[in-house]
Image: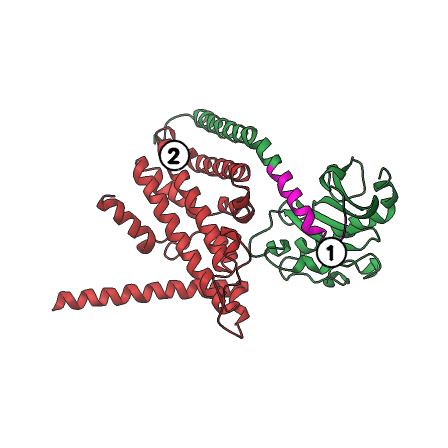
Chain colours: A red, B green
Amino acid sequence: MNTTGMQSIRKALWDENPGLVQLLGLCPLLAVTSTFVNGLGLGIATIVVMTFSNMLVSSTRMWLRAEIRIPTYVLIIASLVTCMELLFEAFFPALDRSLGIFIPLIVTNCAILARAESFASKNRVVPSIIDGIGMGLGFGLLLCAIGAFREFVGHGTVLSRLDLLFGGGPVGGLAILDSPFLLAILPPGAFFSLALAVAGKNVVDRRRKRAAGFRLSI
Amino acid sequence: MTGGAKPVWSAGLILAAIAAVCTALVALTFSVTKERIVANEQAWLEQSLKPALAGIVYDNNLIESVLSIPLPHELPGNEPVLVYRALLENKPVAALFVVTAVDGFSGPIRLLVGIDFDGIGTATRVLRHHETPGLGDFIDSAKSDWIDQFEDKSLSNPDRLLWALGRDGGEFDQVTGASITSRAVVKAIKQTLLYFEANRESIFADK
């Protein structure tokens, strides 16, 4: 991958992370991240849909007209999600039973619409695909992080029920906390966790800036 | 992107063309995958039959014992219902109903309801649902043991008037924030039990 590819991935993962910075796709983000495995499931489904929707929007961008672009994106994303759901059901029935319920949630994810509008409709196909993978990954990693955090604080476990995605017998996960803090897995916990994640990112960014400033002054 | 001066109807035509292409794509995918999806669902159903009869002794081939109850019927759902019948030495011991709760929060919930010959529930399993992950998916036995509370329950335990969620004055636990889902499942199981009570003889008539 060339440097611009790396840069756009870096941007998607940190500087312009769709969940942390753009605060997009909050509905699935807040609703689903009660455990790590749920976050991972939605994350994987989002990466796939975002990559393909960026590819399709980018490859049809010369026929798009400004006044109908939003309905066109919605049509493309909705058909894509429906087709994906059917293909999953037909060819990966086991995966469909675990991931299938996440797929309809993706239609409501405005992060995908935002990438179609602000990136794929203005760029060529390959950069759009890279952007889709990067943004999907950025969103997915945030889902996993918040899911893991809420699961640890709220249930006191780490990585429980991975069998839902990867098959095999039930996995209890590591039980670490004896008296979990239930609030974390309830809806308010989702808001608190996201707020902590955003605050954490801002702290890191500020420290970095300050460190860079020192270096300049020396 | 071109803009501005072009007439509105041409934008409408382009949009209609895109809609037609998208619809064609979905229709094509549907027709290609249809048979495989039905086959997968049937395989999953047959795989779920045995665990739903845990604790019941039977000696017949469940898959061959299937009976289809055509519409109209008093069971949950708007389609013909499949019943798998378990026998021991040619005497009926239990029945498994494949019913659909149509009043779930997001789409139908397909249930496998097991009832022994005395009208006592053996086990209920969710075959397919579209409830929200992390909120309504507790009905899946892989996610929580909520559905197990119906095991060993019948229309006299608790009394049929108490076959409802706690918040509706009944005996069963609901999950906070997902009472529509819980209510749909309780209602479907109760309706299946009532049907079994009224039609037990005819279900096993040819056995």
Q: Amino acid at mark 1?
A: Gly
Q: Disc 1 or disc 2, which is closer to the eye?
A: 1
- Taking the image as shown, residue A120 lies to the left or right of residue B97, namely left
Which residue is identified by label 1?
B55
> In the rendered structure, which amino acid carries the disc numbered 2?
Ala
Residue drawn where x is 35% and y is 37% of the image:
A121
Tag 1 and tag 2, C-beta contact below 8 Å: no
Q: Main secondary structure of the magenta part?
A: helix
Q: Position of residue B56 (x, y in %)?
A: 76, 53
**Residue at (38% x, 50% y) in the render:** A137
Secondary structure at numbered mark 2 = helix
Residue B165 image position (x, y, % from top left): 73, 60
Q: Secondary structure at mark 1?
A: loop
Residue A109 higher or lower than B69, as above or below: below
The quadrant of the rendering that contains the N terminus of chain B is top left
Image quarter (top left, top right, bottom left or bottom right) of the C terminus of chain B:
top right
Left or right: residue A32 compared with residue A205: right
**Residue bearing the label numbered 2:** A66
Q: Which residue is at the front of the view, B27 or A99?
A: A99
